[in-house]
Image (cartoon, grey):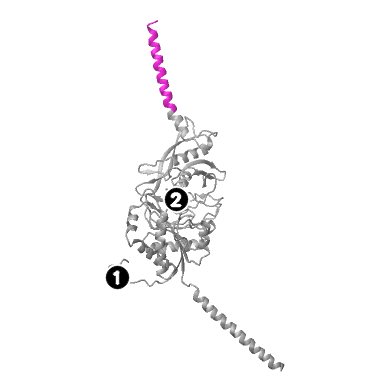
């Protein structure tokens, strides 16, 4: 009986060790990921997705670095309880998309998402912050690429989205970075494509 | 007595009237001599002062804009145009003042100069932007509210201007596929087109045919090399003058190019 005691003790210790290691591993892997997709202004809202939610393929607009053209890049989000949370996930995947390598998202460094709303009329309202973008680091062409990519990314994955409206720090802004005219207070950019496609 | 007095008075009245008439004719003639009958062009170098525009390394947009605008001004004046510049030095320009200056002028066309940047380094100038028309001007009548800021007439005048200038500069003048869906339905877009229909802050409240000209991208090594050559800016400016003149139906008396002289 006494001779068996150390064996049981060692087995329990080893099991406990592995449980702690797996616990830490899963905590960092899943809890960390979920936290990075948390919206600053939505701390009290439902989680964007939960463990066990099925993955869902989406397409974000990125730029091919060798020709500067927009194309569809496949990404994954998770089927959450609400469509709006799926939209939020997509938006964050787009904004946090690749910024190195041969395919990059046309999102300037420093651009932050404040909040996201979806109106019953089908307008996706994207509230961003631009004050952390380095001055002079966004030309007209880059503003156009960002706006177009944002509109296309949101509308091509969610048929419910009829318009995309961009707010800067919760308010209507004349431009994003000094060039592209964002429009007046009650206007959003329509996603109706009548002359162009990418 | 009464009759002769009447005629005498009438004679005085006639002489006075004739004198006033002649004075008016001379005054009008002198006034006309002071009126500048040359066609006017507004050149609007984007940004200025604390507003640098876009930057890439040591290249600063506002500096390029002013340099090119000055060359344009010289070229237009040399070819019989009256030029109004929205800024002539590196000063801050109040946007309302800028819009008022342009809209109260007699300008036939407005050229807003904006060098641009694009981080992949694949885009090159020249590139042209015209403001989209408002929704009521488009064929699609739906619940979407008016989004562009100008009438269909002004849109077409601006588009024609952009294409006339682009043609002289050897650019692909078809509509860029970056063009906003707010453009008129039926416009054929091209992935390589250099004319875009997009809402630009410099064009938004302008009530005259206006185009943003992007002569170069400061992120393009080939553009910087091209505009680094001594005659490149003057050559560019002259082609813009020819494009604008074609647009306005003005025949220019350009010197015949001789051997060794840049066209």
Residue nearer the viewer, B167 or A169: A169
Residue nearer the viewer, B249 or A61: B249
Residue A160 appears in view: no
Q: Which residue is mark 2?
A: A144
Give the distance between the C-alpha atoms of the residues marked 2 and 1, in whole angstroms.
Answer: 43 Å
Q: Is residue B12 above or below residue B257?
A: below
Q: Which mark is residue B221?
A: none
Position in image of residue A33 (x %, y %): 45, 32
Q: How many marks?
A: 2
Position in image of residue A115 (x %, y %): 52, 40
As for residue B89 lying within the magenta part, the answer is no
Give the extent of the magenta segment: A1-27
Chain ID for label 2? A
Asked which secondary structure carries label 1, the reply is loop
Predominant SS along the magenta part: helix
Quarter occupied by residue B235:
bottom left
């Amino acid at each position: 009986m006494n001779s068996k005691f150390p064996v049981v003790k060692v087995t329990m210790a080893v099991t406990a060790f592995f449980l702690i290691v797996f616990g830490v591993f899963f905590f960092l892997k899943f809890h960390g990921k979920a936290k990075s997709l948390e919206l600053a202004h939505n701390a009290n809202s439902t989680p964007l997705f939960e463990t066990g939610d099925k993955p869902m393929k989406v397409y974000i607009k990125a730029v091919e670095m060798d020709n500067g053209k927009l194309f569809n890049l496949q990404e994954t989000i998770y089927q959450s309880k609400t469509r709006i949370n799926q939209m939020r996930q997509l938006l964050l995947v787009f904004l946090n998309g690749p910024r190195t390598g041969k395919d990059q998202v046309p999102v300037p460094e420093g651009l932050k998402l404040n909040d996201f709303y979806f109106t019953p009329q089908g307008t996706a309202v994207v509230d961003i912050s631009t004050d952390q973008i380095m001055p002079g680091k966004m030309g007209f062409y880059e503003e156009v690429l960002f706006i177009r990519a944002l509109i296309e990314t949101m509308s091509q994955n969610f048929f419910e989205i009829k318009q995309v409206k961009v707010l800067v720090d919760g308010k209507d802004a004349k431009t994003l970075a000094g060039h592209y005219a964002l429009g007046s207070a009650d206007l959003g950019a329509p996603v109706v494509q009548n002359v162009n496609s990418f | 007595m009464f009759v002769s007095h009447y005629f005498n008075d009438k004679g005085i009245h006639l002489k006075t009237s004739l004198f006033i008439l002649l004075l008016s004719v001379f005054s009008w003639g002198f006034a006309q001599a002071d009126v500048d009958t040359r066609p006017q062009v507004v050149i609007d170098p984007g940004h200025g002062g604390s507003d640098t525009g876009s930057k890439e390394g040591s290249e600063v947009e506002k500096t390029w804009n002013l340099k090119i605008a000055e060359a344009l001004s010289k070229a237009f004046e040399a070819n019989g145009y009256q030029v109004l510049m929205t800024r002539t030095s590196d000063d801050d320009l109040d946007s309302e003042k800028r819009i008022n200056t342009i809209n109260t002028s007699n300008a036939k066309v407005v050229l807003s100069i904006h060098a641009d940047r694009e981080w992949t380094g694949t885009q090159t100038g020249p590139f042209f932007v015209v403001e989209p028309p408002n929704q009521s001007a488009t064929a699609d009548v739906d619940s979407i509210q008016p989004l562009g800021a100008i009438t269909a007439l002004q849109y077409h005048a601006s588009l024609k201007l952009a294409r006339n200038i682009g043609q002289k500069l050897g650019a692909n003048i078809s509509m860029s596929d970056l063009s906003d869906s707010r453009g008129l339905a039926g416009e054929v877009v091209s992935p390589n087109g250099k004319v875009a229909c997009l809402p630009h802050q410099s064009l938004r409240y302008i009530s005259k045919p206006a185009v943003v000209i992007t002569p170069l991208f400061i992120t393009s090594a080939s553009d910087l090399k091209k505009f680094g050559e001594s005659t490149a800016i003057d050559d560019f400016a002259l082609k813009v003058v020819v494009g604008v003149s074609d647009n306005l139906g003005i025949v220019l008396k350009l010197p015949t190019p001789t051997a060794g002289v840049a066209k």
